[in-house]
Image: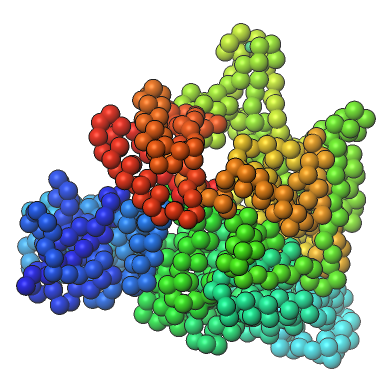
Amino acid sequence: MPTYADIILPLAVPGTFTYEVPEPACGRVQPGMRVVVAFGKGRKLYSGMVLCKHDQPPAGRSPQPVLEVLDEHPVATPAQLQLWQTISEHYLCTLGEVMVAALPSALVLSSNTRLVAAPGSSPAWTGDNRRDILLDALEQRHELSLQEAGQLIGLKNPMPVIKQLMNAGALQMAEELEPAWKPRLQQYVVLGPEAQGETALHGWFDSLERAPKQLHLLMRYIELSRCLTDDPREVRREELLKRSGATAAELKRLCERKVFALEERAAGVPAEGRVGKPAVLSQAQRQALTDIQAAFTSRPTVLLHGVTASGKTEVYMELVQEVLDQGRQVLYLLPEIALTTQIIGRLRARFGGRVAVFHSRLSQRERTELWMQLLHDPGSHPVVVGARSALFLPFQRLGLVIVDEEHDPSYKQHDPSPRYNARDMAVVLAGLHGAKTLLGSATPCMESLYNARHGKYGFASLRVRYGDAVLPAIVKVDLAEMHKKRKMRGSFSEPLATALELALSRKEQAIIFRNRRGYAPAWQCDTCGWIPECAHCDVSLTYHKSDHGLRCHYCGRGYAPPECCAACGSTRLRMVGLGTEKVEEELALLLPEARIARMDQDTTRGKHGLQRLLDRFGQGDIDILVGTQMVTKGLDFHQVTLVGILNADSLMRFPDLRSHERAFQLMAQVAGRSGRKHDPGTVFIQGRDIHHPIIDLVARHDVDGMYARELPLREAHFYPPFSRMVRMVLKHRDATRVQASAQALAEALKPALGDRVLGPEPPPVARVRDKHLRVVLLKLSRTAYRSEKQHLADTLDRLFAEPPHRAVQVQVDVDPL
Ligand code: ADP
Ligand code: ZN
Ligand code: ZN
């Protein structure tokens, strides 16, 4: 009896495709193995993945054969295939799209996959004509696509030949050759073998008396490293030289005398084995830990609400330890790569090399390596720290998923499809493994709070900061009043400016938050009000002073600043609004002494841009950090005692159901960057609408109050958590066409959903890259969710399969943010 396999192809085509598995491979093929098949009119070659094997021939057509089986063992586990299916069903996307997002691209073969000669292999002629042709071509052209390889040797299916050459080590896929991502290395100074312990140090104080410069260097080191206290810190070589004024020769001399030793390691990663002992939990932390453990006995998912700097990470680490002791794996998710690099140091200090990192800045080779390691040796890295894509790794003994900063919108992937939320899919993933999920945040999202209040999730809280620290004091500054009393210095009110001066004089650090990048969000004609807009998008252009140009933040195009108004010819153009670049410039004038840096998309490009900035701030080389919402993320700095939020109003004015929740989270989170161990810190919130209830709630650090205020509003409008939303964006070059299709879609859905269909409406920016946009929003009931979504899927399939709607592009976003 012939065997068939349902194959997932790496394409945005719905469903799977049934192929026949030829005789010799039948027994070998298993779900999760990659196979090569031809697909589509051009019979292009793809590597697909076997979803299942069966004996049902496809109805109504004779199946194509599987051309080659690429793997000896599955590269994806049954649980992974199940997760992909859930994601595809939940987010209304194709299995192929999920697979492409999930697999490291080195594991996906397509006609475009590039083949290169393996490094170091000189083409040893094989005597086989076809193989030699390929090797010859590679020597001349460096790389070939799979498609080209097939054409060269005149075979529809070049795979057997290619595979032989791969097995012989003669050629490779180009993705496998990307340079490995290397952490930036730093040199650290540690005490050498001759200077361990207080007695040894005292001995050196005496014997260095006649070498006062070396003695000074040693004293300075002890001071900087706090090595005689129970709160030691690491000292970089550069930092020590700078702060002590010593020369490299003096340092070298002390290294020779074994007072010091130099260590080179990745920035922020403590020496292995040196630290390693767990922190002693405070009473509050122990209570939270017990509450979490108790909640887990009855519920698989628990929400931990812990205020900023309450020591959530230490509680997580206790749970990690427990799971490791059971021989199971932990996935530790963070919304930002920057946060993964900060936390990795703490985890490695405790769990050593058992901790692996996974995120999109790793090279394809590193991603594939970790994937394969987890597949073949799940014990090699039982703790994986990662950004959202770590969800897709092949876990086999998962015991716990931690989702830190669970409220963070960065967990949601916007583009391309699958538009998944890693927080929500983490719960699904844990469910597939019988594992637990811990969601943690200082500002949990409405959905999670709702689930916790209604018993779907367990709940635990940490309401005090660790140690003696208290939450920062919040000062509200009324901008209207300040303007009236002429107490403004540019965009800074006098109280904030004074506080900045004070912090600077005390050598403390400050963060200024402004949620707009660039210099000025718009230019405007003083005479007629004309504003330059992007020629391809309906949005005003942002001025960037650094390159003296206007830029579209939607399509990225740059424009030369106009010299006169395009409408009336007036030359009186002025800049309106305030961006981070301008804030930075104003600060430099206000505080000429201060070392200021800016953290936004424009300053953190490049592989290490962000990390370098964070390192500098962490080491005290920057006094004031100005930035967009990037500065609100859960970064942990010890010297920040002042936070300024400029123009708080602009955070609350977005026309969005979540704008108040989001404004609360952003302000509370950035406020949480202020104050740590010994100083509670201060937060200045500047705004015109300073008596807005949301600002009051931030001032009181009142998450419960925010929830109590928002919930009735959500209920009244049947918004989440009471409903589940689906947002559809339709795109077409012709405004009339897209409007008509959006109208037709809304009409088609109304009989079943009634007034739970909103729109069509143009979004705030209604044209992007020359395409006109329309939005249709749905509020699906939580109880009839499945059937309503199925109805939506059917309607979309039906409506957009035929002209005239077929030409319109539809993006479906389930649970949009
Ligand atoms: P959160 O994740 O809640 O913001 P962290 O876990 O980062 O808080 O803790 C804040 C600070 O307090 C960190 O510098 C951490 O090292 C310190 N800390 C927390 N708990 C302990 C503990 N039990 N012992 C020593 N230091 C702790
Ligand atoms: Zn004008
Ligand atoms: Zn544009």
Q: Quadrant of residue 178?
A: bottom left
Q: How many marks?
A: 0
- The correct choice, above or below, for 367 with respect to 707 in the image is below
* Residue closest to the eye, 329 or 678: 329
Q: Residue at x 50, y 67 (%)?
A: 427
* Residue closest to the eye, 599 or 447: 447
Q: Residue at x 26, y 76 (%)?
A: 73
- The correct choice, above or below, for 523 with respect to 165 in the image is above
Q: Residue at x 59, y 62 (%)?
A: 451
Q: Quadrant of residue 170?
A: bottom left
Q: Residue at x 77, y 76 (%)?
A: 284
- The correct choice, above or below, for 753 with respect to 2 in the image is above
Find the residue positioned furthest to the bottom.
199
In this orientation, does residue 190 appear? yes
User: Taking 449 as reference, is 139 left or right?
Assistant: left
Find the residue positioned furthest to the right.
485
* Residue closest to the eye, 292 or 670: 292
x then y, percent, for residue 676: 80, 64
x then y, percent, for residue 547: 60, 33
x then y, percent, for residue 110: 25, 55
x then y, percent, for residue 89: 37, 56
In this orientation, does residue 729 appear? no
- The correct choice, above or below, for 195 with respect to 165 in the image is below
Q: Quadrant of the N terminus?
A: bottom left
Colour logic: rainbow
User: Taking 671 as reference, is 631 left or right?
Assistant: left
* Residue closest to the eye, 454 or 763: 454
